Amino acid sequence: MLNLDPTFISLPLLALIFLSIPMHVKSFVSRYGVWYLLFLSFFFYSLVAGMSQLILILTLATITRFAAKRNTQLAFIFATLALCGFLIASKWLIAFDDTNPLHIFIPLGISFFTFEFIHYLTEVKKGSVQVGGARDFYLFSFFFPTVVSGPIKRVQDFTRQITHISTPSQDLLVISFQRIAIGIIYKFAADYLVSQQELAYPQLGNLGVFQIYMFLIIVSMRIFLDFAGYSLIAIGLAGIYGINVPQNFRSPYFSFSLIDFWNRWHISLSSWVRDYLYIPLGGSRKGKLKQSVNLLLAMLVIGLWHGFGINFMIWGLYHGIGLTINHMWKLKFNKTSLVSKKWPLLVNCCKIFTVFTFVSIGWLFFFYSTSEAFSILGYLISSIWSLKL
């Protein structure tokens, strides 16, 4: 995620809003709108990432487009291996070799580029997407509001919009500016919670169960506000240029189950993994054991997508195990219980609390090293045990 400090807000963001003015002139949009967006996208990426990274992503995009045009099994395999290999190498360098000079060649947003390119290849192979012009493909690849941290776009939705591109409606403009404003507030709130998290962390061994749980809330809200804040800014920024991109977060901490949570959290990522990994592996169609393995593999990929490291693997497998248990529970206890009918509000509150607690514990492995995460978890367990005594 971008570190959204006041400089980022007052200069580049305002500049991008100012640069949207031509997209509100109908005659300009109809003749030059797509070319203008493409120019801004190349300019923005070269500005924030540098020319060397722009050239690398252009190379990967060209390989992807070449494979799509060839439309052969060998071409698809070659392009997919190239994309995955480059992503794995980049994640490896980021995680395990901070001093390597090759770091300057790790493209900004490589994870998002890779997933969108694989999505494009898969849809072309299925026949649901036709290989169009180079201009539209490169705009899909480099569209600047989403290029750094998503949301992950779907090529069908995006190309349909730019094929019939028009000036944004007044309603879309109002909603878009509201999203940008809320996103900025979220990002500042996340920065504040970072400082509170750093202050509380050294004292955890001396805190009680309620104070440690408050720490978990801070960690959970920090990541939500950070991720959702950037997504809202990206969606809002795209909107003032007349482009709709998918929603990414939908009140995830009010989920009634872990399955529900992953339908609300980082929606563009979780739906990508569902459509291009979980379902192709067999989903739930080949028995409960196979479904459990597929869930574990899908969540492991989500964990490693965020970063290479044991802690991310544990985080992914932790959610994979949780989803497996959730599916088994749903299968066995599918009927509404008498308690749920009599006290629905109480039951729903308990569900929300349980899911939130489970997810919050998982975030410890997302933020901290494995040993640190287990230490915090140990503090929480010991404080609960002391409370019981």
Image (spheres, rainbow, N blue to C red):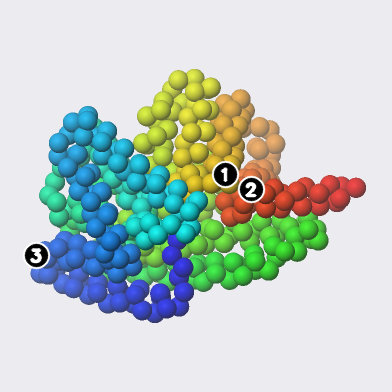
Where residue 289 sits in the image (x, y, percent)? 53, 22
Q: CA distance from mark 1 to mark 3?
A: 51 Å
Q: Is residue 1 visible?
A: yes
Q: Residues within 10 Å of mark 2 (few under 14, many from 20)?
A: some
Picture residue at 75% right of the left edge, 48% below the top: 378
Does label 2 or label 3 sit earlier along the sequence?
A: 3
Residue 34 marker: none
Taking depth in this image into account, of 305 and 261 the one nearest to the observer is 305
Whether residue 373 is situated above or below residue 292 in the rendered picture: below
Q: Secondary structure at mark 1?
A: helix
Q: Is residue 226 above or below residue 295?
A: below
Q: Position of residue 372 (x, y in %)?
A: 67, 53
Q: Which of the image's four quarters has the N terminus?
A: bottom left
**Position of 363 compared to 156: left or right?**
right
Residue drawn at x 36%, y 79% is 11
- Point out which mark residue 310 bears: 1
Residue at the image point whose x is 21% and y is 45% from the top: 63
> Tag 3 or tag 1, which sits nearer the N-term?
3
Type of the residue with mark 1: Ile
Q: Earlier in the sequence, mark 2 or mark 1?
A: 1
Circle 2 sits on which residue?
Answer: 370
Give the residue type that dot 3 points to: Arg
Q: Is residue 389 left or right of residue 383?
A: right
Residue annotated with mark 3: 31
Mark 1 and mark 3 residues within 8 Å of each other at the beta carbon: no
- Looking at the picture, how far across and down is residue 12, in whole percent? 34, 75
Distance between the Cα atoms at labels 2 and 3?
55 Å
**SS of the residue under disc 2:** helix
Q: Does residue 268 show up?
A: no
**The residue under label 2 is which amino acid type?**
Thr
